[in-house]
Amino acid sequence: MTNSRTIAGYDFHCHVDLHKDPISLIADCERRRIFTLAVTTTPKAWPQNRKWTASCRYVRAAVGLHPELAGGRHRETDLLKLCMRETAYVGEIGLDGSPPHRESLPIQRRVFGAILDEAARLGGKILTIHSRRAAAEVIDQIGQRAAPGHVISILHWFSGTENELLAGVAAGCMFSINPAMAASKGGRAIIETLPLDRLLTETDAPFAEIAGRRTHSADVMDLVGQIARIRRQEEDEVRAAIAQNAARLFAFAALGADARKDMS
Ligand code: MN
């Protein structure tokens, strides 16, 4: 089990398997003691990611089906549901209503709904969720299908309106903040508004960029200071809150793991 006291930083959304050298990234996260959630975009990537992270202290793998791929890969939903029995962490999942993916929204909805229902049925799941141009609908689905208590939803790289943000908070969601958000006007408004007990950090590496280079899990270390400055709070206070929020998730995941043992 993850020992919160030794963790130096938190990257709750990282595409380890799309990095050019996943093995060295994982070794680096282990060495720096950065808790890193390795999200996946198809359940076919699950066995490899599970193998890479099986002996890790700080890196965990999540099984997912990315909304941008759901149109072509919706037949993998049953495989994903099977893999969900093996882990507390599910992602990347969600909806994408941006122009290139809008057409597949009806399929995306079916896939996302089925995953939320399975997560609620199994319980003890922590979800990392994409909601670009679909925030209201994603939050609505979470509210209807994935009540906190059974499932914890983390809205990753959230870019909705302030009202949508408040709706997400009311629905019990957590929010993972990345360096690209800290560098954008909209992102900074979200960072300022979020209640401290909902805040987590992520990188979305290798996709998010800062200062013209791709992000790396280690970027979460400086990010805490940036978040503190945006919120006009002490860095130690923000760091402690993130650690406390993460500890709550780990305790929730551990309860789910015990339940899985009891079932087997
Ligand atoms: Mn992502």
Image: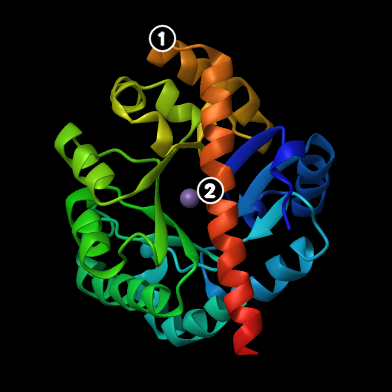
Q: Quadrant of residue 216?
A: top right
- Residue density around tag 1, few if under 14, some if 14–19, many if 20 or more, within 10 Å: few
Viewer can see residue 208: yes
Q: In which quarter of the image is residue 246?
A: top right
Q: Which residue is drawn at 42% across and 35% down?
A: 197
Q: Where is residue 230 in the image (x, y as percent from the top left)?
A: 40, 14
193 left or right of 115 in image: left
| Badge 2 element | helix
Amino acid found under the numbered disc labelled 1: Arg
Q: Position of residue 64 (x, y in %)?
A: 50, 67
Q: Residue at x 48, y 66 (%)?
A: 125
- Residue density around tag 2, few if under 14, some if 14–19, many if 20 or more, within 10 Å: few
Q: Which residue is drawn at 79% across and 52% down?
A: 57
| Badge 1 element | loop
111 left or right of 103 in image: right
Viewer can see residue 203: no
Name the residue beneath numbered marker 1.
232
Name the residue beneath numbered marker 2.
248
Q: Residue at x 62, y 71 (%)?
A: 257
Q: Quadrant of the C terminus?
A: bottom right
